[in-house]
Image: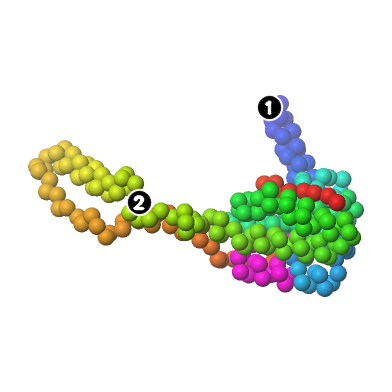
Amino acid sequence: MLRRWPWALIAAFLAALLASAALAAADFPPLTGRVVDQAKILSPVTIADLERKLADLEQKSGIQLVVATVPSLGGEEIEPYANELFRAWKLGEAKKNNGALLLIAPNQRRMRIEVGYGLEGTLTDAVSSIIISNAIAPRFKAGDFNGGVTRGVDDIITALTTDSAEWKPKPTEMRPEHDASLLDALAPFLIFLFIMFVISRIGRRSGGGNVIFIPMGMGGGGGFGGGFGGGFGGGGGFGGGFSGGGGSSGGGGASGGW
């Protein structure tokens, strides 16, 4: 019995952690739509306009962007609160983690763009910081919450939907076919020689005598061509309803105040 008490303590500790996590999650506002205005700082017209833009973004790209305003951060800094809220709502698709959250706490005069794992290469920390500093904060300082949130969402959508060109080679950067390296040109021949060598060794060990090689055409087959082509092409598929799809965030994004 004495040997079991450490495990009982560990189990009790884990149960306490789970209970505290569940209690913290209960303090978060429910995910009722793409715009959750708990702080009541947005007009109905702005909310309707944002809902339309965010629904269009999700329909066309699968990216789930949500705007949330809260009257209080519950004594937390905005960074852990935003990350916990993102995880509680499970924004984005589980396999792609393509969710993003614009969180505003007007009473603390703080805001944050929280980015899912799958979008960190597009909506980077630097881009998020620029959007907060240049697009949102100046309008918030002037008391224009509707204009600040709208401009921030517009800039986030622009950053998320114009990234594909950054991942593709520019036309001026593409190398002509005749400019391929010597290794690329010799690779098929070297692979063919290696295969013949392996087959000959197998033939000798099995006692089958000489192995007859039937050379295969080396040109036009394209067996190794295009292996890496289109690696960043759009995935397209996404789920039906609005509820979070199981996405997660590792803390990427940026915070700011006004």
Within 10 Å of the Cα at label 1, are there few (<14), some (14-19), or many (20+) other Cα atoms? few
Colouring:
rainbow
**Could you say where residue 210 lies in the image, as x and y percent from the top left?**
9, 43
- The residues colored magenta run 51-66
Numbered tag placed on residue 112 in the rendering: none
Q: Residue 55 colored magenta?
A: yes
- Residue in the picture at 72% in, 30% down: 5
SS at circle 1: helix
Question: Quick one: 16 or 216, which is closer to the camera?
Answer: 216
**Could you say where residue 162 lies in the image, as x and y percent from the top left?**
61, 61
Position of residue 119 relative to residue 208, above or below, is below
Numbered tag placed on residue 179 in the rendering: 2
**Could you say where residue 228 lies in the image, as x and y percent from the top left?**
42, 54
**Could you say where residue 43 lies in the image, as x and y percent from the top left?**
86, 69
Sequence-wise, which precedes: disc 2 or disc 1?
A: 1
Question: Quick one: 162 or 245, which is closer to the camera?
Answer: 162
Answer yes or no: is residue 84 visible: no
- Residue in the picture at 82% in, 45% down: 77
Answer yes or no: is residue 14 visible: yes
Residue with the mark numbered 1: 3
Question: Quick one: 196 or 20, which is closer to the camera?
Answer: 196
Q: Is residue 258 left or right of residue 6?
A: right
- Residue in the picture at 82% in, 65% down: 147
Mostly what secondary structure, the magenta segment?
helix
Question: Tag 2: residue type?
Answer: Asp
Question: Tag 1: residue type?
Answer: Arg
Count all numbered tags in the image, as a single digit: 2
SS at circle 2: helix
